[in-house]
Amino acid sequence: MNSGILLALGAYLSWGLFPLYFRQIAAVPALQIVAHRTLWSLAFVALVLVLSRRLSWLRDVSAATWRRFTLSAALIAVNWLVYVWAVGNGHVIDASLGYFINPLVNVALGFALLHERPRTGQWLAVGLAALGVLWLTVAGGRLPWVALVLALSFGLYGLMRKTAALGALEGLTLETLILAPLAGAGLAFWTLDGSSAAHSAVDWTWLAGTGPLTAGSLLLFAAGARRIPLATLGIVQYVSPSLQFLLGVFLFREPMDANRLVAFGFIWGALLVYSAEGLWQARRPRPAAAAC
């Protein structure tokens, strides 16, 4: 249990501190960063699989699995692209909002796509979050598209992976393998036409580091998630957007006006309701099995 919490906390801490890393390569266009992130992630996970002698599964991947992971690869690519763009263009607070509302988006997606039946407390949390998004849209005069795209893309990605036949490491391998031809072609094109933003060894080092950073965080999360209850994992997950929010406000000095504070108040209230309801459900005594 303790090791599981530490592993999960390590994953969410690293995700929460991602803005510090990606700000170091903010001069590189987001699409080029995602292409590098894809190829270096593939190189890293391939090395891990070779060293651990876990490559035999690749031969048994069915056509249906390839199709499913093509869709999940597209979703994670969109998520990466919008997130990297947001960090490089002064929208870290908006990115944090996306990951704050992600658990509540998951509830709504489960209802809409999996015919799940959310409990009353979960519906209340979703409603409060919707009010926060509506407030931002009306008072701010624009739809918080960064937050919504991040929450929806990651929520749909989670649904795809929830029923996938592969584990975290194998799944990331397949996704990056699917994206690799596009990423490689893009990097070749940018290099040949002189528009590649990676010029120095320092640039290449930062870009290459996106691979271990991405895969390492995912492996920490997968290891931690297997060792702790979902209710505990649901609380720990707020470490990541909280760190991003604090970085956006206090380090990157992004604007935090009254309208945003009200919207975040709705969101934080929703998360409080959602977390309290989840903990209450987890601690409820289970009904005894009927005697035969």
Image: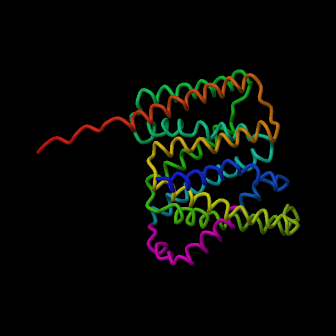
Q: Where is residue 200 in the image (x, y as percent from the top left)?
A: 88, 67
Q: Where is residue 50 in the image (x, y as percent from the top left)?
A: 56, 77
Quadrant assignment, res 35: bottom right
Q: Which residue appears at 51% of the width and 76% of the height?
A: 55
* Residue extent of the magenta highlight: 37-62
Q: Where is residue 277 in the image (x, y as percent from the top left)?
A: 45, 31
User: Relative to the observer, which residue lies in front, 140 or 252?
Assistant: 252
User: Relative to the observer, which residue lies in front, 28 or 168?
Assistant: 168
Q: Which residue appears at 81% of the width and 54% of the height?
A: 29
Which SS type dominates the magenta stretch?
A: helix
The quadrant of the image that shows the C terminus is: top left
Image position of 258 with respect to 219: above or below: above
Image position of 70 with respect to 250: above or below: below
Queried whether the magenta region covers residue 48, the answer comes back as: yes
Quadrant assignment, res 196: bottom right
Q: Which residue appears at 49% of the width and 57% of the height?
A: 68
